[in-house]
Image (cartoon, coloured by chain):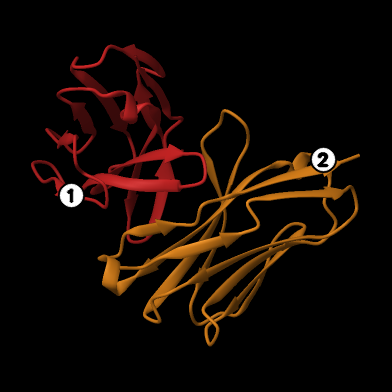
Amino acid sequence: GEQVEQRPPHLSVREGDSAVITCTYTDPNSYYFFWYKQEPGASLQLLMKVFSSTEINEGQGFTVLLNKKDKRLSLNLTAAHPGDSAAYFCAVISNNAGAKLTFGGGTRLTVRP
Amino acid sequence: EAAVTQSPRNKVAVTGGKVTLSCNQTNNHNNMYWYRQDTGHGLRLIHYSYGAGSTEKGDIPDGYKASRPSQENFSLILELATPSQTSVYFCASGDSYEQYFGPGTRLTVL
């Protein structure tokens, strides 16, 4: 079935720097992609959803890139601030997984003032 | 607004005991899901349901049962709890592709 590898598991950056988190997936039939943010002790909050037909998506303070050829999904926080400190998870839906979400292992991001 | 609630929020159980985790959603979503979250593993799917009366095995169903008595409620049952089931459990509801997550239940099995 689908496997999703997320890197790095831990990331520490200074305020104002960029932070990049990357996921690679195995199923070429994957077609719907998600980024979730989880603050300590809290539930998962949807940051962005991406269809396979769209390669670049921009949100507030971040950009999501999808490279279907390399089966790679990335989240780029362009100018991180302390409020971005959290765990981030990618998730993928593929036909071979019966339209269920397969999650990456997560990245714990710390933004230092 | 979409709402998924879970109870209890924290639970301490003894090995061999029975544990029931409850989830309620007011979204009128057909699909509901149970995940566990462990460090380094993200969320892993235990059981899910397409509607009242249906339950399906997810990726890690061993040691767990599920029950969907109504559109709103989905329970996760540990008949004989083991320390390896110590984890944080999340319920979610959804239609199409988006899923909305509950606040989580922290379960400790001693």
Q: Which mark is residue A82?
A: 2
Chain drawn orange in the picture: A
In the picture provided, is A40 more to the left or to the right than B89? right
Q: Which mark is residue B57?
A: 1
Give the amino acid at mark 2. Pro
Q: Position of residue A46 (x, y in %)?
A: 54, 50
Q: Position of residue A74 (x, y in %)?
A: 63, 68
Q: Secondary structure at mark 2?
A: helix
Chain drawn red in the picture: B
Residue A32, above or below B39: below
Chain under numbered label 2: A
Residue plotted at (23% across, 22% down): B81
Residue A68, above or below B90: below
Q: Secondary structure at mark 1?
A: strand
Q: Position of residue B78 (x, y in %)?
A: 20, 26
| Quadrant where the N terminus of chain A is found in the figure | bottom left
In the picture provided, is A49 more to the left or to the right than A39? left
Q: Are marks 1 and 2 on the same chain?
A: no
Chain under numbered label 1: B
